[in-house]
Amino acid sequence: MFAVIFIGPTYLVVLTSFKTLDDLRQGNLLGFPATWSWDAWAKAWDSACTGVACSGLKPFFFNSVKIVVPSVLISTLLGSLNGYILAQWRFRGADALFTMLLVGFFIPYQAILLPAARFLGFFSLANTIPGLIVVHIAYSLAFTVLLFRNFYVAIPADIAKAARVDGAGMFLIYRRIFLPLSLPASMVCIIWQFTQIWNDFLFGIVFTGPDTRPITVALNNLVNSIEGVKEYNVDMAAALITALPTLVVYVVGGRYLVRGLTAGAMKG
């Protein structure tokens, strides 16, 4: 029953994206296309209008790639390093810092819009892709640190103590021992961060300009651009193009996600 609820809309979206407008006008909603056509996909990618620009989703797709890749990699690395320090190197104020991170984890998106805009304006990063990357990294830091901290706490402290006795320092222990053990937690973090940042709409529309918009903003503009006949097949193709990268990430990293969850990466 649940499979039908989830698969039903996907079935309609996929079929509609391969139908022509003449096929759609005949009202054959559930049936297969009379003629399978890639025209809607080609138009959504290359020439559909997203507001006043008619360049399709292509430039915005690559904008999202430029935003997501560094945001995910940097936030994962910072979360891993800070989580390791909080879990294995106790220092004065560590509990207070961890508590503040927990509070930051629950701060809603809307609460940081104005401070983030002032910060980006002060450093001349407003309406730029690097500016949006900084916002995503800063906002996600509480989650990534919490995730890795909980993962590293489960690793016996005797391992680090033995390495200290042998003369290894904090960063050497991290690089040689803890980082290689971090694959399950890293995959959980990467999949989670990729999904959140790729699907983000609010930060994308607030902190970028017309030429630096992510694909989610372009999709919204495409669907709401009404000029002439409404092309539902193009809208469905555009939605699928937008969703494909996250689907690929889940398919490729799915088994690592399950392994990371069972290894305790999400224990709180």
Image (tube, rainbow, N blue to C red):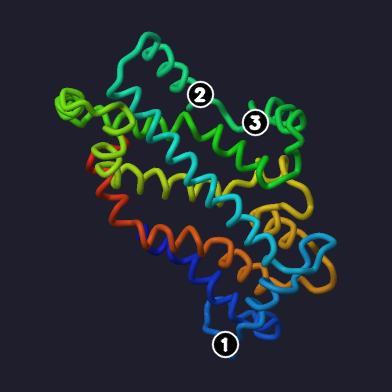
Which quadrant holds the C terminus?
top left
Query: Would you identify the image quadrant in which residue 16 lies?
Result: bottom right
Query: Which one is in front in this view, the residue at disc 2 or the one at disc 1?
Result: 2
Q: Residue at x 36, y 34 (%)?
A: 147
Q: Farthest residue toward the top?
A: 92
Looking at numbered disc 3 in the image, what kind of residue is underneath it? Gln
Q: Residue at x 16, y 27 (%)?
A: 166
Q: Position of residue 185 (x, y in %)?
A: 32, 42
Q: Earlier in the sequence, mark 2 or mark 3?
A: 2
Q: Position of residue 50 (x, y in %)?
A: 76, 62
Q: How many marks?
A: 3
Q: Residue at x 43, y 45 (%)?
A: 192
Return the residue at label 1: 36
Return the residue at label 2: 104
Using residue 162 as the reference point, say whether residue 143 is left or right of it.
Answer: right
Contact, CB < 8 Å: mark 2 with mark 3?
A: no
Using residue 238 as the reference point, say whether residue 98 is left or right of it.
Answer: left
Looking at numbered disc 2 in the image, what kind of residue is underneath it? Gly
Looking at numbered disc 1 in the image, what kind of residue is underneath it? Trp
Q: Position of residue 66 (x, y in %)?
A: 60, 54
Q: Secondary structure at mark 1?
A: loop
Q: Secondary structure at mark 3?
A: helix
Tell me if residue 123 comes above or below residue 34 in the rendering: above
Instruction: Classify mark 2: residues with Cα within 10 Å, few (<14), some (14-19) or many (20+).
Output: some
Query: Would you identify the image quadrant in which residue 227 lies?
Result: bottom right
Return the residue at label 3: 110
Towards the viewer: 195 or 62: 62
Distance between mark 2 and mark 1 Cα atoms: 49 Å
